[in-house]
Amino acid sequence: MGCVGSKSYAGSKGDQAKSSKIDEYLRKERRDMEHEVKLLLLGAGESGKSTITKQMKIIHLKGFTDEERLSYKDIIHSNVIMAMRAIINATEKLGINNIAPENKDLAEIFTTNEILFEQKVTPEIADAVKTLWKDPGIQELYSKANEYQLIDSADYFISSIDRIVADDYCPTPQDLLRARARTTGITEICFDWSGVHWRMVDVGGQRNERKKWIHCFQDVTALIFCVAMSEYDLKLYEDERVNRMHESVTLFEEICNCQWFNDTSVIMFLNKKDLFEEKIKTVDLKVCFDDYEGGCNYEPAVEYLEKKFMKLNRNKSKVIYSHVTCATDTQNVRFVFDSVKDIVIRASLATSSLM
């Protein structure tokens, strides 16, 4: 049989111009990727990954506009309402109800289903929050917050209730860093720093979000794994039979030794330093790890946790870099990332075979 000849069609000049633009765009994308650093943020839920992403915007992208800050107002109002609801609902779970009789009606405001749809702290709700927060029975429940689910920033926002309900309220950068909205899906932030284009990828940490992680594993320059140090006496939101720190240990072992990251730099952030420093004074790390012998002392506890995670690395040629962080402290995050920067850029150069 003879060969069937083929004829190429150049197309119109408009088509050729469009094709040239596409080719140029693809070439630019390839060039950009060669000079891009991709940071992947992983960790269990509530470990502070999203707060780190917000800090990058504050540090490298001139922060949040007024419009962006105002968009967090409803989230912060909801955080106040849901925090007070969680505290009051704990009366049933803990079997403790020492709320003053004269405050019972105020407490009931937060137990109704209607409050779940309230996106604004009204003057009535604000007055109820302030009165209840002064109630010794509420403070007793708050002191047992490790036994139920309560956001870290409950005290911060409830104590700022007058400022938050003001008509001219615009969330501050610190408010934004402490606002809690559970991450779902994949969030990216890009910025230029020290002549390098950085792309930071944040994914939800709850168990039902982790099936999405695999889509982010390709072309990772460095992996940042966040551990919430202060959560050694807390249970998971999604499974209250599981200790949060134990979940982080299991997850880090899987990620650190995953074949996708055999040649990837791994940086561990032992996060929530501020909360951990306060909690360790009264709650021994031994409640989480039987072999811990350092007592209620900050330095031995941090050293123990660092070694605990480091030992999980089965690849002896891989170095795990560790930093103690407070993700809500912009100066601390800036300092830590100055240290991380050189590690990541060297890893990027090595990957590009330029070293």
Image: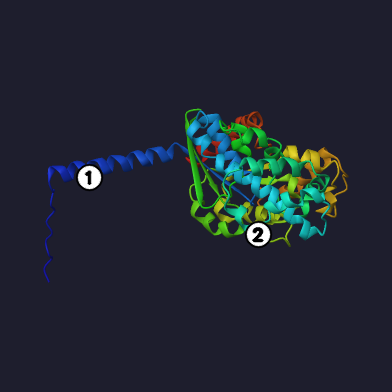
Secondary structure of the residue carrying numbered label 1: helix
Q: Residue at x 63, y 54 (%)?
A: 257
* Disc on the earlier residue, 2 or 1: 1
Instruction: Give residue 343's quadrant in the image.
Output: top right
Instruction: Give residue 2's quadrant in the image.
Output: bottom left
Q: Residue at x 68, y 61 (%)?
A: 239
Amino acid tagged 1:
Ser
Number of numbered markers = 2
- Work out whether residue 32 can be spotted: yes
What residue is pinned by disc 1? 19
- Left or right: residue 163 versus residue 245 is left
What residue is pinned by disc 2? 238
Count residues near mark 2 (Cα–Cα under 10 Å), then give few for <14, some for 14-19, many for 20+: few
Amino acid tagged 2:
Glu
Where 82 sits versus 69, above or below? below
- Pick the residue in front: 135 or 140: 135
- Pick the residue in front: 114 or 205: 114
Q: Residue at x 60, y 46 (%)?
A: 78
- Work out whether residue 179 can be spotted: no
Q: Position of residue 196 (x, y in %)?
A: 48, 32
Where 127 sits versus 100, above or below? above
Count residues near mark 1 (Cα–Cα under 10 Å), then give few for <14, some for 14-19, many for 20+: few
